[in-house]
Amino acid sequence: MSDRPIWERAYDRKGFLAVSAASAFLAACGGTTEAESEEEEPTTTAEAKAASGTLFYYNWADYVNPKTYPAFEKATGVKVKKDFYVSNEALQAKLQGGAKGYDLVVPTGYMIQILAGANQLREIDYSKLPNVEANIDPKFQGLPFDPDDKFSVPKDWGTTGFMYRTDLVKEKPASWKDFFDLAKGAYSKKVTVLDGIPEVVGSTLVMLGHSYNSEDEAELEQAKQELIKLKPHLLAITSTEYKQMLISGRAVMALGWNGDGAAVAAKKPADYVIAEEGGEFWVDSYAIPVGAKNPDAAHAWINYVYDPKNNAVETEYTYYGSPLKRDVLKPAIDPAVFKNTDVFPPGPTLDKLEPNEVTPNGTKLRDRIWTEFKSA
């Protein structure tokens, strides 16, 4: 393992270190880090009439079940080339820097709004998405970041909370205050937070009794001071290595996403907690960038994964919530995953969560806090 502090390295949303910091820099500057897809010989089906050629898919790493790529290629005849980004902001930098040719991307909701506002996204053609029309849960239509469903189709949804090893933490933390207090006390140097500005700053604001989306400078100053106090006690600032750290026991608590919490709990005694004070509800969505060379292939992918049996394969791999109607998903998915409240939190739990709706000014203020936090 590198001797560099983990918060000086670059990571992606899901599970594993995907690209090096140098690759992340190239991605942000318009370079390329494409990974070749599996070389399975495709077969032609009726779906191939609407799409052909190659799909250039720019995504978080480890955010697609590896079985889905060859299955899609066989079903449609479309080949897949993959490239990965380490954050929504890296995706934004690349697209706004003039990168062309990516056919499909998966930003989080707030970034959909930013990219659409900057004229970086094509409109979705729902005539090519019969599975979406038939199977999407209406709760995932007309979302605040895309109220007319013009530029995005939901992929996954989830929450931001914290997880802990129940065999290594004798307490039963239930709030952000518990998390911060234990991190600075009994479990100093055994706790991680995400390498994510919205999640970490937002969760700290919620702990202090403020909105996840607060732009009040006094409230943000409070959050900054809390984070600076926390910094010396952290094992790592990472959006991916924390899962393996928890499994190995090197970390005992982590601020993170529900899918990773469920994945840890599948291997070790662990619990994922949506904090009593609240937190974040997020949606990642498929979108097609301006400059896409093969938008038909992008639509073919979205339509393919909105088939319930294909969507179930994805949910069983990512442990993030599916946007499909519950009644069409249930017959296709593993019952244990369907009933898992970390994957599909109940309505009363979701009611206390907020989506990320920070304005550009709020983002600038958070960027300054993050710089001071990391350099503390």
Image (cartoon, rainbow, N blue to C red):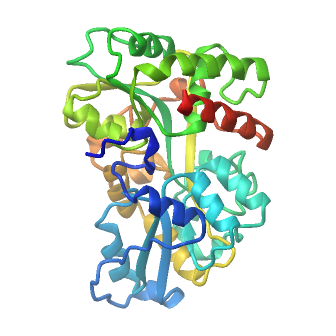
Give above or below for 142 relative to 65. Answer: above
At x 67%, y 16%, the residue is: 222
- Is residue 264 left or right of 351 when viewed as pictured? left
Q: How many marks?
A: 0
- Camera-nearest residue between 189 and 61: 189
Quarter holding the N terminus? top left
Quarter holding the C terminus? top right
Q: What percent of the width, then of the height, locates residue 110? A: 67, 47
Give above or below for 54 relative to 357. Answer: below
Q: What percent of the width, then of the height, locates residue 361? A: 80, 39
- Camera-nearest residue between 199 and 31: 31
At x 21%, y 26%, the residue is: 269
At x 72%, y 67%, the residue is: 120
Residue 35 placement: quadrant = bottom left
Residue 358 makes an appearance in the image? no
- Is residue 229 left or right of 365 when viewed as pictured? left
At x 54%, y 33%, the residue is: 374
- Camera-nearest residue between 56 and 131: 56
Give above or below for 150 relative to 212. Answer: below
Residue 263 placement: quadrant = top left
Residue 375 makes an appearance in the image? yes
Q: What percent of the width, then of the height, locates residue 336? A: 27, 40
Give above or below for 374 relative to 108. Answer: above
- Is residue 284 left or right of 340 when viewed as pictured? right
- Camera-nearest residue between 228 and 87: 228
Q: What percent of the width, then of the height, locates residue 96? A: 70, 65
